[in-house]
Structures are given as C-alpha cells and as structure tokens.
Amino acid sequence: MSASARYVAIITDGNGRWAKQRGLPTVDGHRAGADTVKARLRDAVDLGIEELTVFSFSTENWSRPAEEVAGLMAMFGERIDAETPELDAEGVRMRFLGRREGVAPELIERMEWAEETTAANERITLFVAFNYGGRAEIIDAARSFEGSSEEEFRSHLYAPEMHDPDLLIRTSGEQRISNYLLWQCAYSELVFRDELWPDFDREAFEGCLREFEARQRRFGART
C-alpha cells in the first residue's frame, strides 16, 4: 500500500470537447476548466496535498487556431489579476513553469507579480505549467549543466524545488503524458480518468487518490 499522495500533477484535458458538446465557444471551455482548477486546488488543501501542478498551456499549443490562443492568453492574464489576491489570502504559493520567450511581456509581468505576491505562502504550492514542454525543459537545463549527478541536473530545471509528483492524473480518457514533466514523472503513478476536465469533481479527485493509495510503489526494488 502506498502512503497518501502529497505531490500531485494533473493534465487538465478536455476543455475544448466540453465546450463543443454544449455548443459553446472553445474559450468558454477553458474558463470552465480554470474554475475547476480553482475548486480542485481548494480540495487539495483539504486532502493534505502539498503541491499541485497543472498543465495550462504547452509549447505545442501555439499551433492551435489564432483566435483560441488569443482567448487563452487574455483569460490567463485576467485570471492572474483577479485571483492572485484571493489565493494569496488563502495561503497558496504560485509558481509558473515554462519558457518565457515568446510570451507577451505584459503577461510575464503579471506572472512575476503573482509569484512575488505569494512567495512567502506555505499552505500549498500551485505550479502552473505555461508555455511548457518536458523536452524543452530538459534541453534548457542541459544548456547550462556542467555537473555529473541527477541532483545537480535538477537544480537547472524550471522549478528545482518542486518535488517529483507521487501521482499524475489525466482526464478526458486519453492515456498518454503528452510531453509533461518528463524528468519529474519518472516514477509517478499514473491514473487516467474519462471525465472531461470541467467535469472532474471532488469525488473523481478522491477516487484517484484512493487508487494511488491502493498501489505498491517499488522504485525498482523487490518486495
């Protein structure tokens, strides 16, 4: 039996399909997905999770329709402005993972403001993977790496202080990790759910945690 998961990462997949099923614009699906992130973050605090990492926008997502990308960028900035004070009051520390190149300077300023505002909080850390790709992170780390150990290499990752996730959850029925946290998830337990992300409620979240607790983690050893 595994102990309770303290570090959880989620691939929040299915926002677009959720909107399409309801005849809504794609951006409405992303707004619903952002609401779900906020709700599950609060659940994570209740459930004893110390770090929650969510996949917000990948390096590959730039290839999506320009209208969708523009809507995502606008929504992302709006959410940072509106929710950072609230999350700060709730003790949430925010960190953004990913390349800053190619992101609008005003959005980078908002991200840095959110990180600085919440830097001293310790209740839970919310890592947001934005303009993120697992291969890109490894390449970027390798450019400045001159050491010989895994721990030295980790210090060159986007967020060296982030723990390896105990559990990686993906919603929407897809069963792949899509270039997400490739270094960090080397030994993570994987749970795939059929719910589209906006429909991923607390009951589904708790079900994932129970499934994790029922597994036996060996990390290459024998029992």
Image (tube, rainbow, N blue to C red):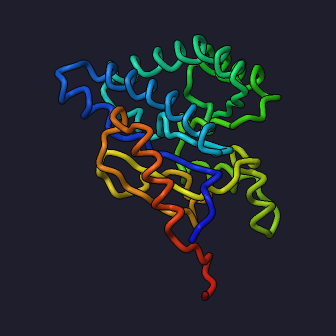
- Pick the quarter of the image with the N terminus: bottom right
> Which of the two residues, 98 or 121, is positioned nearer the viewer here?
121
* Quadrant of the image occupied by residue 184: bottom right
| As drawn, 174 above or below 123 | below
> Which of the two residues, 8 or 128, is positioned nearer the viewer here?
8
Q: Is residue 116 left or right of residue 208?
A: right
At a point 78% along the width and 29% down the height, the residue shown is 121
Q: Position of residue 211 (x, y in %)?
A: 45, 61
| As drawn, 140 above or below 104 | below
How many numbered badges does the structure rendering display? 0
Which residue in the rendered view is the most extreme toward the bottom?
222
Q: Position of residue 146 (x, y in %)?
A: 81, 61
* Quadrant of the image occupied by residue 126: top right
At a point 65% along the width and 45% down the height, the residue shown is 48
At a point 25% along the width and 26% down the height, the residue shown is 19
Q: Is residue 184 left or right of residue 10?
A: right
> Which of the two residues, 68 or 175, is positioned nearer the viewer here?
175
At a point 36% along the width and 46% down the height, the residue shown is 171
- Pick the quarter of the image with the C terminus: bottom right
* Quadrant of the image occupied by residue 199: top left
Q: Position of residue 192 (x, y in %)?
A: 37, 55
| As drawn, 144 above or below 34 | below
